Every structure is written in structure tokens, then in C-alpha cells.
């Protein structure tokens, strides 16, 4: 059967729609040109009326009568003079046209003298890098024309370059990282220090685009982010680097901000994270932010190597299994984490072999957060004990199928002190605080496309998830709420996100009971024969003395007994 052609309105509808839009735009432009004098006069009349109203308001009340009489006299004289109303109307229209003219300053065709001098000096600085003696028609030469090398440029209010397009010859080695780094360092130094620049290299067109990045917002506090289980917001970045935004409260307004989302779980390609930074750069803030998000769906074990109580607010909270700051407690917690990882793997493997879904106790995520674990390495070496980092090998290697995530935060100078499994299996990387380009490349695995600066606010840095691009990062403000120097608003924001405290901080204990409630019944341990009840003595005077003695008798079972707290 022959195919019937589509109607013309469907076959070329897009072309007709585009033509209709072009005709409408042309008609609107023509109408604007025709009505431009009327628009100008109307604007002028409105400005004259506003000026007259303002003059009448500024006139004192005792002088308004004389002013009104003067205006009425002028109107009467104009009305009696031959052709007076016509001349008055012409004068009014001329004054309105003069007042309604476009007063915006005309855009200059080129840069001023200071801007031209800045572009010329930048051009002369690039001559040694973009010139060759064998080039018959060099684009860069001493005393040459800079306008051919810089086709596009823009300046900010302070007279510094805000955007620049640099053309360079085809023989420049733009494929080498060292050659690029030299040009980027030179452009950042000549364009103005203290700002972050973004460089976009177009190898095919032999062009380099330089742009100034705006500072990331630092007033985003800790809050509930709109994420799914398995997604953790590390911070926020530039809107041009990610394809997603999150609604949140910034200050007193609600807006959408692009986040850096780290995905964990069974299908994650970067199941563990390593955060490095200088002291005071915000690595502890990042761990607190991750802990508050992880407690929504899982359990958390925290190792505090700093020993300053940065995580005291999480002690005893629902879902926080332990907050350890001593070597013995850290070793015991990490040994339990390794054993728990193995147990989850065995249980999930047995369920898979039997054709059953994994048990529920293997699906709940377990987070192991370590702040400065290298501090325990020195203590363990001094005491002749095992390095706690060696206990992370099982959770790091087999944590992804067991829903176990490890997050390590340490100082940038302690990178060499981290164990090999930690450096090998933490594919998600974060660097906070000031760092050189060499340090960023060694940690992240790739250089950032921006120039690092020396002074950064707390929580500012760079992040890279696996083999993805390098993002600028600003961690949400999640300070220690028990710190006296923390503002009240930030303390309340963190305290509102904490889970309820359901257990005592130092473990469960049996509360003392009143004498009126009687003695608690002792439960015999497993395998222990039940003791026969002892008949009470006939003397009632010895009964009050026996009750306190039985209440103070220690339990035979050394394990903790869970009871309801009074």
C-alpha cells in the first residue's frame, strides 16, 4: 500500500511557526519605531507631572495660595493672547519630548585608556609563550596589536577583567598540562589576584575563554535536603557544573541551589569517601553533615581522633552505635565493624544461594565515620598495639555489598600516614581549605579547572566523585552546637536535626527501685539452675534490713540488661 503524504500544515508546520514568529517580531519592531515619539512625549509628560507634584508638596502651606494665584494668572494671559493655547501646547510638547528622552549613557565602542593599558600589558606578557621565531605572521609579537588576540573582553566595576577570550596560534602545545598551567597562572596573576577564574580550552578553535567565578554561598545551614535513600549532599557548587538543583532555605529566603550529591549503596561506584584539609578548614563540619544525613536511614559509628568533643552532640542518640575517642574503644568498635561486615556478607550470600531476598538486618546502612585516624596510629605504635587502620580493610574492600560505608577525614599533611587500603578504596575525594595545585591533583587525581586562592572560608574546597569532573564545593554550615562560640541560629539548626536520645550516654543501667515497689525478680542465666525460693523469716524486724542488702547484690550476668529508664 502506498504511503499517503502528510498534510502541508503538519509537514512544514515548524517552518510556518518560525516564519510567523519572525513576522510578529518585525511588526513589533516597526510599531515601536513608529510610536517612539509618542512614547517619548508620554514619558516626558509623566516626568513633568511628577516634578509639579513634588514642587507642590515641597511648597509651604502659607505660600500655596500665592503660587496658585500665579499659575491661574499665567493660564489667563495665555488664553487671552492670540494663538496662545497653540503656542502653549507646542511648548509643552517640546518640554515633554526633552524630559522624556533616553538618558542612559551611550555605550562606548571600545575600552578606555586604563582598560587598554591593562589589555596591552596582558598581551605583552603572553608574547614569550605564544610566539615562535619561525612564524612568518606572528599573532603575538612585542609591540603588536592586542585587539586581534583578544576578540572579546569585559571589565567589572573595579576596572578588572571579568571575561576574556584569548586566541593563540595552532602550534601552541595546548594538550600538555604543564603548558596550560603556565598560561592559567599568568592570566590569573595579570587579571587580578584574590578571585577564582575558570578556564575553558577550545583545542579545535585555538581559543581560551577566561571567566571569573562568583563566590559560593556560605550562609546555607544544616537542614533536611530533598534526597532519596543512598544520596548524601556533600555541599553546593556552581550552577553550570551539575544538572540538578535542590530547594532549600538560604538565610530567610527559599531558593534552588545546585548540589554535589554522593551516591552510596549496592550500585555505587564510589562507596567510600576521603576528605582532607588543613586545620580549621571544615572537615569535621563535613563529617557532622554526613552523620546527620546518614542517621535518617542507617546507623553510625564515629571515631574522634581529635579528642576535642566535636561529636559529643551525637552521643547516645538513636542510631549512633558508638562515639569513641580512646584507643581501646576505637579498636573494639572497628573490630566489631569488621565482624559485622563479614556477618552481613555471609547472611546475604546464604540468602542468595537459597533464592531468598537478603535479610532485613543487612539492608540497613552502616556508616563508619573516622576523624583523624592517623592520631591513633601513633598511639598504637607507642603502645605496641595493632594499628586501627588495619581493621578498616574488610569494610573498605567488602563494604559495598554489605551496605557499609566508610568516611575518613584527616589533615592534608597526614596523607602519607594513611594506610594503603584507605587510599586505594576511597574513590570519592574532598579537599577543603587552601591547597596548591599539586596537592589538589595528587589527592583528586585531576587538576581543577579553576585557580585555587589562598584565603577560603571554612567548608570551601573541591570535590571529585570517582572519574567525574572536579567541582567547587561549599559544605553547609554544621558546627558543633555545644561550642560557646557558635551562633544560636546555627546551634538550633543542628539540634533540630539530631535524633532523639533514647539511651543513656554511657550504656544501659538498672535504675534503683523504691522499697515500696519491692525487690526486682532476678532472672537466672542460661544454664544456671533456678534457685528455690527462700521462705521469709518469722521476725518482721529483720525484713527491712534484708531488702537493701538484696538490692545492692551484684548481678550474676555481666552483660547489660535493658530496662526502661525512670
Image (cartoon, grey):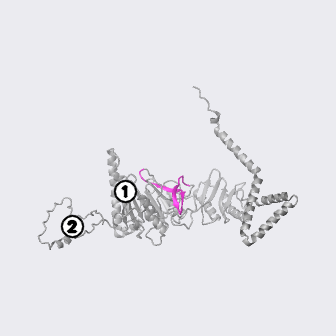
Q: Quadrant of the C terminus?
A: bottom left
Nearer mark to the viewer, of 1 and 2:
2
x then y, percent, for residue 542: 15, 73
Q: Is residue 259 magenta?
A: yes
Q: Which residue position is annotated with label 2?
A: 519
The range drawn in magenta is 241-266
**Horizontal arrangement in the rendering, residue 411 relative to residue 79 (left or right):** left
Task: Name the one closer to the observer, 301 or 517.
Answer: 517
Vertical position of residue 332 compared to residue 241: above or below: below
**Quarter of the image where one finds residue 547:** bottom left
Q: Is residue 38 visible from the viewing direction of this image?
A: yes
Residue hosting label 1? 394
Q: Position of residue 211 (x, y in %)?
A: 62, 59
Residue 522 marker = none
Q: Nearer the viewer, residue 207 or 254?
A: 254
Spatial CA distance of label 1 from label 2 is 47 Å
Query: In the image, residue 265 lies at what x, y percent?
Result: 42, 52
Amino acid at each position: 500500500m502506498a504511503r499517503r503524504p502528510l498534510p502541508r500544515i503538519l509537514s512544514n508546520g515548524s517552518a510556518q511557526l518560525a516564519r510567523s514568529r519572525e513576522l510578529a517580531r518585525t511588526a513589533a519592531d516597526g510599531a515601536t519605531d513608529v510610536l517612539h515619539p509618542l512614547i517619548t512625549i508620554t514619558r516626558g509628560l509623566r516626568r513633568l507631572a511628577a516634578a509639579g507634584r513634588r514642587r507642590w508638596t515641597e511648597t509651604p502651606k502659607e505660600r500655596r495660595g500665592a503660587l496658585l494665584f500665579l499659575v491661574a494668572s499665567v493660564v489667563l494671559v495665555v488664553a487671552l493672547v492670540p494663538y496662545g493655547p497653540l503656542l502653549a501646547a507646542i511648548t509643552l510638547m517640546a518640554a515633554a519630548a526633552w524630559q522624556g528622552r533616553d538618558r542612559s549613557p551611550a555605550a562606548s565602542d571600545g575600552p578606555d585608556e586604563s582598560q587598554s593599558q591593562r589589555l596591552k600589558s596582558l598581551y605583552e606578557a603572553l608574547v614569550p609563550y605564544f610566539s615562535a621565531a619561525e612564524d612568518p605572521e606572528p599573532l603575538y609579537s612585542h609591540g603588536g596589536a592586542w585587539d586581534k588576540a583578544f576578540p572579546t573582553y569585559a571589565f567589572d566595576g573595579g576596572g578588572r577583567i571579568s571575561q576574556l577570550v584569548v586566541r593563540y596560534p595552532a602550534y601552541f602545545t595546548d594538550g600538555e598540562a604543564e603548558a596550560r598551567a603556565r598560561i592559567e597562572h599568568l592570566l590569573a596573576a595579570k587579571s587580578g589576584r584574590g578571585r577564582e577564574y575558570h578556564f575553558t580550552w577550545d583545542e579545535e578553535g585555538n581559543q581560551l575563554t577566561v571567566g571569573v567565578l562568583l563566590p559560593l554561598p556560605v550562609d546555607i545551614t544544616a537542614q533536611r535536603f530533598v534526597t532519596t535513600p543512598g544520596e548524601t549532599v556533600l555541599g553546593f557548587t556552581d550552577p553550570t557544573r551539575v544538572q540538578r538543583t535542590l530547594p532549600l532555605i538560604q538565610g530567610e529566603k527559599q531558593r534552588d541551589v545546585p548540589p554535589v550529591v554522593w551516591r552510596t549503596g549496592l550500585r555505587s561506584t564510589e562507596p567510600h569517601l576521603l576528605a582532607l584539609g588543613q586545620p580549621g578548614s571544615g572537615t569535621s563540619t563535613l563529617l557532622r553533615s554526613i552523620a546527620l544525613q546518614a542517621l535518617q536511614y542507617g546507623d553510625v559509628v564515629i571515631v574522634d581522633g581529635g579528642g576535642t568533643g566535636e561529636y559529643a552532640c551525637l552521643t547516645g542518640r538513636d542510631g549512633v552505635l558508638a562515639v569513641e575517642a580512646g584507643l581501646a574503644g576505637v579498636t573494639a568498635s572497628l573490630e566489631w565493624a569488621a565482624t559485622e561486615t563479614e556477618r552481613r556478607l555471609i547472611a546475604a550470600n546464604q540468602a542468595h544461594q537459597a533464592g531468598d531476598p537478603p535479610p532485613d538486618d543487612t539492608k540497613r546502612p552502616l556508616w563508619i565515620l573516622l576523624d583523624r585516624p592517623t592520631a591513633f596510629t601513633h598511639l598504637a605504635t607507642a603502645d605496641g598495639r595493632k594499628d586501627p587502620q588495619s581493621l578498616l580493610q574488610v569494610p573498605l574492600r567488602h563494604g559495598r555489598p554489605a551496605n557499609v560505608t566508610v568516611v575518613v577525614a584527616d589533615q592534608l599533611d597526614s596523607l602519607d600516614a594513611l594506610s594503603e587500603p584507605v587510599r586505594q578504596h576511597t574513590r570519592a575525594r574532598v579537599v577543603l581549605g587552601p591547597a596548591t595545585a599539586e596537592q589538589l591533583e595528587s589527592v583528586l587525581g585531576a587538576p581543577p579547572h579553576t585557580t585555587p586562592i589562598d584565603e577560603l572560608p571554612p567548608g570551601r574546597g573541591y570535590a571529585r566523585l570517582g572519574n567525574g569532573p572536579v567541582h567547587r564545593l561549599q559544605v553547609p554550615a554544621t558546627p558543633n552546637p555545644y561550642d560557646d562560640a557558635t551562633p544560636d541560629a546555627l546551634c538550633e539548626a543542628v539540634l533540630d536535626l539530631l535524633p532523639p536520645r533514647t539511651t543513656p550516654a554511657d550504656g544501659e543501667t538498672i535504675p534503683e527501685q523504691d522499697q515500696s515497689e519491692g525487690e526486682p525478680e532476678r532472672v537466672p542465666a542460661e544454664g544456671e539452675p533456678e534457685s528455690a525460693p527462700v521462705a521469709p523469716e518469722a521476725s518482721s524486724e529483720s525484713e527491712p534490713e534484708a531488702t537493701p542488702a538484696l538490692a545492692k547484690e551484684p548481678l550474676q550476668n555481666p552483660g547489660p540488661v535493658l530496662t526502661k529508664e525512670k
